[in-house]
Image (cartoon, rainbow, N blue to C red):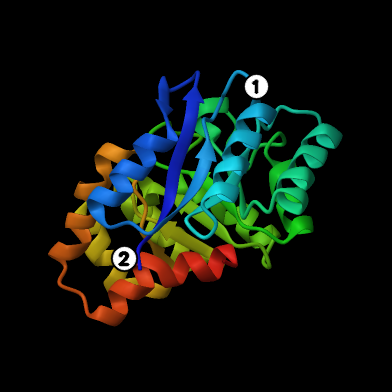
Amino acid sequence: MILDAHMHLGEDLIFGTNDSPADLLAYMNEHGIDAALLQTGILPADPRAATQRLYALTRQYPGKFFGAAVLSPYTPQAQYEAFMRWAVCDLGFKALKLQGFAFCAAPSSPQARKIFDTADQLGVPVIIHTGNGVPTALPSLAIPIARDFPRLKIILAHAGGGMYGAEALVAAQTCENIFLETSWCTVLDLKSFVQTLGCTRLMFGTDVPLNAGVELAKYRALRLSDRQYEQCFYGTAAAVLNL
């Protein structure tokens, strides 16, 4: 069983992507990926419509697609909380997302605080973009917020994105509620993560369909045991996301 813990659906006005359901199904079929956690584009033209479209896909393919909700951290508190309560409680979404690079809002910023408050109240994890886009995307900036919310599970997307892989590892070593999603990290970082943290803190992700084969190859290059692959490819994400 392979669960892709990081994939996007639909238009993104910031990054210029617009993957369709057909694109997602094609890459999953090609690479033997059984399920995916989907986020909308970071900035779609209509966030509510984009979220409803993602929800429709989870209904059309139950157990194959799951949703994670994204909204600008500059959204007023009450409006942000209402949107996320709708996404989690009514639509069954499994996580909230902070893309601090896109919105210039680090995890430690006042604007981002509402994301962690809301996720803590709703009992779902927060996915934080890390890697490109420093300083807002530095993995270490998740440490204070992870300490402030010790019950909240925090996923560092891209695990530092290669250049900051060592820092992502330090963040995970420092805070037991930090987990690493490993798309775009180097194979040497991935090896270090497995050796230092073990597979219960790691989850497989791709980010974009074109990257799926690369990410699978990095894991397979490590020649892990079947149990380790099962944990990285499915077990950690299923536990953290409460699937």
Residue ranking furthest to the front? 60
The quadrant the C terminus occupies is bottom right
Picture coordinates of residue 189 (x, y %)? 25, 57
Element type where label 2 sits in the image? helix
Residue kind at label 2, given as amino acid type = Phe
Q: Residue at x 70, y 48 (%)?
A: 91
Look at mark 2 in the image and give the residue it sits on.
Answer: 193
Q: Residue at x 29, y 72 (%)?
A: 229
Q: Is residue 56 left or right of residue 91?
A: left
Spatial CA span between label 2 and label 1: 38 Å
Residue kind at label 1, given as amino acid type = Asp
Look at mark 1 in the image and give the residue it sits on.
Answer: 46
Q: Residue at x 36, y 44 (%)?
A: 25
**Number of residues whose C-alpha sits closer than 10 Å to that of mark 1, classed few (under 14), some (14–19) or many (20 or more):** few
Question: Which is more toward the observer, 60 or 173?
Answer: 60
Q: Earlier in the sequence, mark 2 or mark 1?
A: 1
**Number of residues whose C-alpha sits closer than 10 Å to that of mark 2, classed few (under 14), some (14–19) or many (20 or more):** many
Whether residue 207 appears in this view of the structure is no
Element type where label 1 sits in the image? loop
Whether residue 152 appears in this view of the structure is yes
Picture coordinates of residue 23 (x, y %)? 35, 35
Question: Which is more toward the observer, 208 or 72?
Answer: 208
